[in-house]
Amino acid sequence: MKNFEEINKSSFRTLFESVSEGIIVVNKDQIIVASNAAANRIFGYDEGELKKRHLDTLIPQKYVHQHQGHVNHFLENTDHRQMGSGRDLYGLRKDGSQFPVEAGLNPFELQGQQYVMAMVIDISIRKSQEKQIIELNSKLEQKIERRTEELKQTVLELEDEIIKRKEAENKIKESLRKERELNELKTKFLSLVSHEFKTPLSGILTSTTLIGKYTQTEQQEKREKHLKTIKNKVKYLNNILDDFLSVERLETGKVNYKFSTFPLSKVTNEVIYDANMLLKDGQKISYPKDIDDIILDFDEKILELILTNLINNAIKYSPENTTIDIEAFTKENMLSVKVTDQGIGIPENEQKYIFKRYFRAENALLNQGTGIGLNIIKSHLENLGGNINFTSKENEGSTFTVTLPLTSN
């Protein structure tokens, strides 16, 4: 009968081979020590054929020198990251053909040796689709220009109908603008979902793989660390799915609010308790004062969603050793909750877009996020007779204020 370690090895080998992304593991000398079936298929090699080859085998010649510099820098500053951020990466198949790839790097140490696991995806189809979208947008712009010129010429020829012609022109422009905006939103959404799911899934895979290495009783602390990582990543993915479902329900008008009477402190305590798990080193949350007597007749889950989003954003966009301050007060049958941080703030020229769906400020692009949380909050509050506003200054912090009725109407 197989022992526990043999079962683990077999299980993780099955997982390694069943992952749809290509996985390539190299040692510190960039010699390939392992590759899964997906990687072999992507690069056109038979099973075991890549083993003991140098990683340069999979890189087009003109990128080899540049790639060496990137790898050396990565090994000096090891952390999990997306390789080639902001640059196009290319792989080299066995038959000599080149193709665009996306790669995530995950360093780890095994038996005193340093290794790097690369998650590789062939993005040829995506690149082709992006090119088609650019071409379609270009044709669309040309079409707009042609139609606009035709309309202008018609206006000149028919001076008696100038007003009607201009109205027609504006309507066509708006229709085409909305069409372009919709195409851009679809593209952005697909890219967003791909990225936001891939990063935590890579983390889950890495932690799952590493757990199998800690088989001794005294290594329980290390196992707990990776289990916590897996739980957090799964919770993050679940929250994303909840957000997408919320958008769909709001769009279709299928939201059913469930009102109940509860103290503000109940929801606040639960949200802050969960948020404490996300705090960076030195960060702390200042608990709101004098809220024990505040009773609401409201949708408890919606209030929890609102507070969770605002507090988690404050943590995410604030540096270490800062305070997230929460205040709550009532006035004329309305409750106001303020969440203030000392974070990166929102650039002034982008503040008008902050509640738009999928919008993310330029200084926040390196942080994980979908850009739909604030949009969902605003929609729910408007449905329930509340509102949200904010003040913010770049590099100094932001204050978001939510106002909602104490009793349902």
Image (cartoon, grey):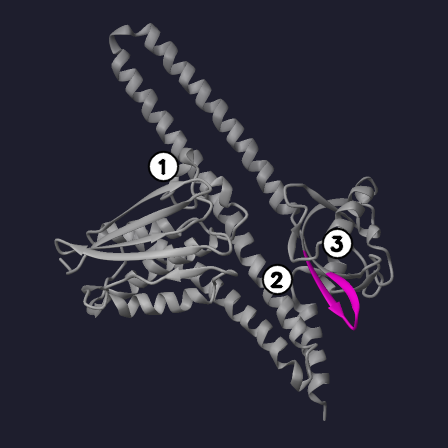
**From mark 3 to mark 1, how far is it between C-alphas?**
41 Å
- Which residue sits at x=33%, y=23%? 170
Query: 242 or 389, which lies in front?
Result: 389
Looking at the image, is mark 3 or mark 2 nearer the viewer?
3
Residue 202's disc number: 2
- Which residue sits at x=39%, y=52%? 373
Residue 76's disc number: 3
- Which residue sits at x=42%, y=39%? 182
Q: Which residues are magenta?
A: 105-116
Residue 351 lies in what quarter of the image?
top left
In the rendered image, residue 20 lying in the magenta stretch gets the answer no
The picture places residue 399, in percent across and down from the top left corner, at 35, 48
- In the rendered view, does 293 fall on the left or right side of 140? left
The picture places residue 253, in percent across and down from the top left corner, at 27, 54
Query: 249 or 143, which lies in front?
Result: 249
Looking at the image, is mark 3 or mark 1 nearer the viewer?
3
Mark 1 sits on what residue?
352
Which amino acid type is marked by label 1? Lys
Which amino acid type is marked by label 2? Ser
